[in-house]
Image (spheres, rainbow, N blue to C red):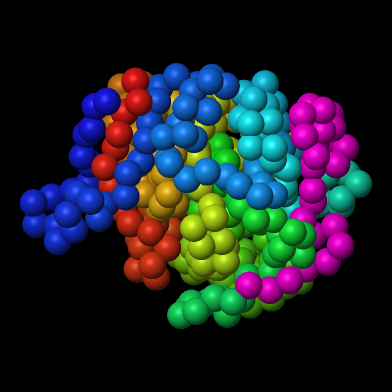
Amino acid sequence: MLIVSLGCSSQNKKTNEDVPKVYMTKEISPESLIRIYKALGREATGKVAIKLSMGEPGGHNYLKPELVGDFVRLVNGTFIDANTAYGGNRATTELHLKAAEDHGFLALAPVDILDSEGEIELPIEGGKHLTRDIVGSHIKNYDFIVNLSHFKGHAMGGFGGAVKNMSIGIASSKGKVLIHSAGASTTSWGSPAQDDFLESMAEAAKAVADYAGDKIIYISVMNNLSVDCDCDSNPANPEMGDVGILASLDPVALDKACVDQVYASNDHGKIHLIERMESKNGIHTLVYGESIGLGSQKYELVSLD
């Protein structure tokens, strides 16, 4: 096992034991997904929720059932998601379940649209923009969350990974609007400052992380690296090659490691994803997330290859 430290200087007060580990394999396969899950050392027990975007109909870059199926069966998981706030073909529970069926997820495991029967609020301590996160009421039915994200670009956030998947992804329709409006409304997206929106994503993610405690893990697959999100019905085709699968117990460390992998890539096509990330100041989500205790931007990268 090769261990490479990234983001850790000799001036850093944290010891190596304190710095979160991010595990990585360049192999993207059902077997490697299970292997990286086991490397985390935190077993998914009880009723397990798998937070994964099953993809907006028309899109084609989302994580595929054939990649995640063996893992989901291993942990006896249920796919979870929440309805969208922008219309489209996942805006209602009926449409969302049809998309899940059409994309092959219902054939693998149960699918639960978290806000199909209402919402609950999770408190946010110390937030600048949000005092609560509004999520689907079904979240309370689960003992453990696997935040299984597809790392790629995002038209508003610059990139979408673990933080986006657990903030906007788990928020109900009203909760999504609350985040996008930086706390101003549950009915209108408004036009908040970009950094205010990014900070609101981090605050909502912290609400979920605090709620889950040590009953959550974070896994990101870096494939089909489009500049657009899986919520886009007509996303741009990927212009850089696949990178691998990364996982951590720290969502900020995981997202930072994924961002670093993009910059470190020898693939010239990375310029498009980098432009998307930088044009939206996406890294600010992680800078602010670290400042409110969501996680650490410093990490150790542990290769499983």
Q: Residue at x 19, y 49 (%)?
A: 16
Q: Which residues are magenta?
A: 97-122
- Which image quarter is the N terminus in? top left
Q: Residue at x 71, y 63 (%)?
A: 140
Q: Residue at x 79, y 42 (%)?
A: 111
In the displayed structure, would residue 113 be above or below residue 78? below
Is 124 inside the magenta-drawn segment?
no
Q: Position of residue 170 (x, y in %)?
A: 66, 56
In the displayed structure, would residue 278 be above or below residue 236? below
In the displayed structure, would residue 10 be above or below residue 172? above
Is 111 inside the magenta-drawn segment?
yes
Query: Quadrant of residue 224 in the image?
Result: top right
- Which image quarter is the C terminus in? top left
* Foreground pick, 305 / 95: 305
Q: Residue at x 79, y 48 (%)?
A: 112
* Foreground pick, 218 / 171: 218
Q: Position of residue 37 (x, y in %)?
A: 49, 35
Q: How many marks?
A: 0
* Foreground pick, 190 / 211: 211
Q: Position of residue 198 (x, y in %)?
A: 49, 61
Residue 236 in view = yes
Relative placement, left or right, of 11 versus 189 is left
